[in-house]
Amino acid sequence: MRTYLLKRLLFCVPTLLGITLVTFALSRMVPGGPLSQRLALLHEEGIEVGDEEIARYRDLLALDRPLLHQYGTWLRQSTTLDFGRSQSGDNLPVRTKIGEALAVSLGLQLVSILFIYVLSIPVGCYGAVCYGRWHERWVTLGLLLLYSIPVFVLAYLLIVLLCTGQVLSILPLHGLRTIDRQGFTWLDHAADIARHLVLPVICLSAAGFTAMTRYMRAGMVEALALDFVRTARAKGLRERTVIFKHALAHGIVPVLALLAGLFPYLLSGSVIVENIFGIPGMGRLAFDSVQSRDYPTLMALSLIIGIATMAGFLVSDLLQAAFDPRVRLR
Amino acid sequence: MTDLKEITAALEERAAVQGPRRILHPRRRLHQAALWIADTVILASAAATLIASSAPWVRIDQGSVEFPNFRTWIRADAAWLAALWVYLLVRILLGSRNRRGWMKRILIRGLAGLFLLFLVLTHLLPDRRPPERVSVFAEGFSIQAPIPFDPDHTDPEAFRAPPSRRHLLGTDTQGRDLLSRLIHGGRVSLLVAFCSTLIAVSLGLLFGAVCGFFGGLVDLLLMRVLEIFLCFPQLFLLILVFAYLPGSLLAVVAMIGLVAWTSIARLVRAEVLRIKNHDFVLAARALGCPSFMVLIRHVLPLSVGPTLVAASFCFAGAMISEASLSFLGLGLPQGTPTWGRILFDGKGALDYAPWISLFPGLLLFLAIASIHFVGERLRDALDPRARVIAPEIMPSVSISKGRIR
Amino acid sequence: MTDVVLKVKDLAVSFMSELGLVRAVDGVDFELRRGETLALVGESGCGKSVTAHSILRLVEHAGGRIERGSVWFNGADLLKMPAEALRRVRGNRIAMIFQEPMTALNPVFTVGEQVAEVIREHLGRKRKEARAQAIDLFARVGIPDPSQRVDHYPHQLSGGMKQRVMIAMALACSPLVLIADEPTTALDVTVQAQILDLIASLQREQGMAVLLITHDLGVVAEVGDRVSVMYCGRMVEHGTAHEVFSEPLHPYTHGLISSIPSLTAPRGQLRAIPGGVPDPLDFPSGCRFHPRCFLKTRLETAAESGGSRICSEVSPSLREWRPSHPAACHFAEHMPPAAKEPAP
C-alpha cells in the first residue's frame, strides 16, 4: 500500500506542473497584456499613472524578464498565496475573496457528495437486484428523466414550485442566510443555513445522483453475474450477505473511481447553481470575475480548482486501492 | 457454465453487426416517442425558414404570383435541407425492414438527385438574409407560413403575451413570437451540439486509440496530459475562456468540443486496451501486420459501438453545455436565439411571464431526454449479455413459491 | 443395497434467448448413492453443467428456468423448497465446487475469510473458532503452511491451490453430497491428478457422495464408480464405469470410447464421431443422435431400413438392455463392443 501511495504521489507531480503552466499561460494571454489591463482599469477610475508607477508595476509583475523568470516569480507568489489584488473594483486581496468563497463552496460540495453517495448506493443496489421488474423499470425511467433536466431548468422549476408562492412557499429563494438574524441561537443559525442549502444541494446533486446510481446499478449487475457470487450462493449464504458483502465489494469500486469525476462535475454545476441561488461560493466568484474581467482572481481560482480536483483524483484512487487489493499491484 | 457462455458469445457476434440497426426498430412506445421527438426537432430545424417566417409562401396579387418566402432563403437553409436528407437516408435505409434492394436503389437515386439540387442551391443562394420587408397584407391573397412570424419580428400589439391562437407559445419581453424563436433556436443548438460532438469524437478517438494501442511511455505521457485537462471542470473552463475571447459561433463550437473530448478519449482508451488483448490481434501481429494497420482494421472497428454510445451522450452534453453558456449570458453573440438564451431572457420575467422560460426549458428537457433514451437503447443493443439474463425471463413461479432473489 | 442420497427425476431446464427457446436439459433422470462417485459425462454444451446447477437451483439466477421435474434429497424436493430451507441445504448438506477456480473466489476477501464465513453461517461458530477450523481444513486439503495462507488473497494463490481452497470451503460442514462441476478442466494434468486424489480420499473419509461433471473420459475411468452419459440435454446411458467402458450400449458412448487414442495399440486412423453437435435451437427429430449414428447407417445398409426409420421419428427412452445398464437406443442389442484399436 505504501509503495502504491508513493507511486501515485509521484504521478501527481507532472500533473501539478502542467496545471500551473496552463494557468500561467492563461494569465499572460490576457488581451493586451496584464499591464495594459491594469492601466485601463485605473484609467477608468480616473487615476492617472505616471511612468514611475508603470515601471513599478512592470517590476512587480516581472514583465521585462524572460518568461521562465516570470513563471518562477508567479509560482513563488502563488505558494505564499499572494495572488495580488482583485480588479473587480473592490480591490480586496484575492486571497481573502477566495478564502471566503472556498469555505462556502467546500461545505456545499461536501454536503452534495454525501447526499449523492448516501442515496445512490441503495438505489443502485435496488436497481440491480430488481433488474427488469416493472417497478424498477419505472424508477430507472424516472432517473433518466431526472438526468435529462438541465440544472437551471430544474432549479427554476423548484423555485417556482417551492419558493415563489405560486404553489408553495416553504423554502427561501436567495442567499445563504436570512438577512434579519437578530436573536438567533446557535441552533437557529444552523437551521437557517440548512434551509437555505436545501434547494442548491438538490439541484447540484440531481444529475450526479442519477449518474452515480446508474454506475452503481451497472457495477452491481455485472458483479451479480460474476462467478464468485455464484460460489457465495452455492455456499448457502444469506441473499443479503451475497449482495451486500460479496457483490457490493466488487460493484462499488467503479463508483469510488467516479468520485474523482464527481468533483469537477459539481464544481461546474456550482457555477450555475450558485448564480441562481445567490450562494457566495467559488462558482459565483468565478462567474462574477468573468463578468468583470478580474483576471488575478480568475487565475488564482483556476489554480486552486485545478489542484483541488487533482486532490480529488488522488483520494479516489487511494480509496479504490483500499477496497481492491489488486489495484495496489498495478 | 459453458453452455451459457457459448450462447452469449454467439449473440455478441450478432449484436456487433445488428446492434445499431435495432434502435431504429422501436418496440416500446417510449422508444418510439423518443425517435419521434428527434425527428420533429430535426425536421423543424431544417425547415425553419419555411415554417416560421413572416414572408408568406405564396402571394397572388392582381394576377401575378410570387413566392416571397423562397426569396428569403440563404445558404444555411439549403445546407440544413441537405442535412435533413442525410438524416432521412440514415433513418429510412438503415431502419427499413424492407429486404428488397430495388426500393432502396430508387430511393437512393431519387435522393441523390435532391442532394445535388441542394448543392446547386447552396451556391446560388445568397449568404445573408435580406432585410425583412414590411409585408402589406391588405392586397391580394397570400398563403402564410404556418407560423407567420420571423424570430426577430416584434409584434407591437403583444408584449409578453401569454399563449394564444395568434402566438401559439406566447411572446417574449420584446414581443417576439416564442414558437418561431424556438424553432430557429433549435437550428443553432443542434448545429453547435453536432459540430462540437464531431470535434470531441475525432480528438477523443485519435487520442484514445494512440494511447491505448501504443501503451508504455506514450500512454503514460498522454494520460498526464489528459489528467491536466480533466483537472479543470468543464463549465469552469468554458467560462474562463470566454473571459478572454469574444463570443462567436466558432468559438463556442471549438471550446465545447475541446472540453468534451476527455470522456470519449478515456472510453476509447479503455476499449482499445480491452480489445488489444484479444487473440485475434495477436494473430494479426503474428502474421506480420504492421501496428498501424492492426489498429485501423482490427481494433477500431470493434470499438465503434461504445464510441457511438459515448458520442450520443456527448451530443446531449454539448447541448447542455451550450445551453448553460447561453444561460449565463456568455458564448454566442447577443442576438442569436438559442434555447438557453431564450431561457436567459425570460429569467427576469418568471413571475408574470413564466412561459418565456418554461417552453425552452421543456424543449431542452424533451430533446435531451430523447437523446439519452436512444443512447441507452443503443447501449443495450450493443451489449447482448443483458438480454440473456434478461427482464423477459420469469423465475419459475410454479415450481418455487418463495422468491430466490 | 446402498441407499439413494440424491434422486433427480424428469428435470427440464430452458433458457430464453434472443434466438429462441433453448432447451438445455430436456427430461433427465439419475440417482446418486451414498459413498459413490457418479460421473456425468458429455460433450461441451450437452447440458451437464446446467443439470448440476439446477440441483441447487443456481441456474435460476443465471436466467435459466426450471420447467419441470424434481430433485429428491433427504425426503424433500429441492425444487419446491422455500428459499430459506434451500439456503440451509446449500453449502451445508450439499456442496458444490466449480470449474474455474480463477474466478470462483472473491478477489477482495482473503481465502481464509471466504472459508470461515461458511462455517460461521451454517455451524454458528464465532470468528476465532471459524478461523481455526479454516486452518484445519486447509491442512486437510493439503495446502502447505495453512496458518499463513489463511490470510492470503486469491490472486496470491496458484490455480491448484485455489481449487483446494474451494474444496476446503465445500467440506467445511461435512456435506452428504459434493457436486463437482468440471473441477479439473482448468488445471494442469499433474495438478489434476492431485485434486482428484484429494477428492477421492476425502470422500472415503467422510462417506460423501460425489457427482462429478466432466467431459474427460480419462477422469471418469479413474474415479468414477458409475457413469451417466448425456447428449443434447438427455441421458443416453447409465451404468457402472466398467460396463460402460467395456460394453457401451449407446452408439454415442461407443463413439466416445472408441475415439480415445491408445498408447499401446498400433498406429492407425483415429476414430472420430462424424458430424457435430446440433444447434440447441434446432434439435433433430426423434433420437437426437441419429444424424451421426454409425449404427443407424450400418442397419440401413444391412437392408433393415424399415426398422431404422424409427430413429428419426421416435425419441428412444431409457431401456434396461442389460440389468442396471439402461440405454436410450432402439437398437442397442446390435451394438458391437467398443473398439480397442484405431481404424487400420
Image (spheres, rainbow, N blue to C red):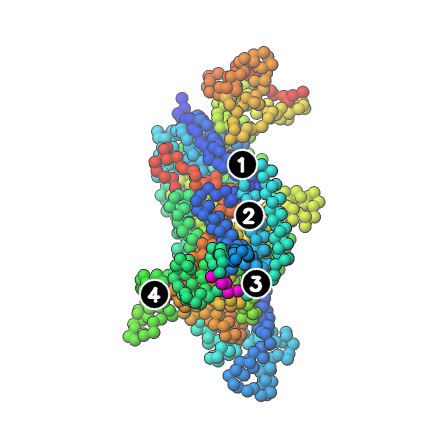
Tell me the kind of residue under disc 3: Arg
User: Do marks 4 and 2 both belong to one polypeptide chain?
Assistant: no
Of circles 1 and 4, the one toward us is 4
State which quadrant residue B219 falls in.
bottom right
* Prevalent SS, magenta region: loop
According to the picture, the residue beneath numbered tag 2 turns out to be B88
Q: Residue at x 34, y 71 (%)?
A: A178
Of pointers 1 and 2, the one earlier in the residue sequence = 1
Part of the protein shown in magenta: B132-138
Mark 2 chain: B
Q: Position of residue C220 (x, y in %)?
A: 53, 28
Is B135 magenta? The answer is yes
Which residue ends up furthest to the left in the rendered image?
A: A183
Tell me the kind of residue under disc 4: Thr
Relative to C203, B397 lies left or right: left
Which numbered disc covers residue B6?
Answer: 1
Comparing A158 with A101, the one in front is: A158
Q: Is residue B141 above or below residue A94?
A: above
According to the picture, the residue beneath numbered tag 4 turns out to be A164
Mark 3 chain: B
Q: Residue at x 46, y 40 (%)?
A: B389
User: Do marks 1 and 4 both belong to one polypeptide chain?
Assistant: no
According to the picture, the residue beneath numbered tag 3 turns out to be B129
User: Do marks 3 and 4 both belong to one polypeptide chain?
Assistant: no
Mark 1 chain: B
Q: Is residue C201 above or below residue A155?
A: above
Badge 3 crowding class, 10 Å Cα cut-off, few under 14, some 14 to 19, many 20 or more, is few
Q: Quadrant of the C terminus of chain B?
A: top left
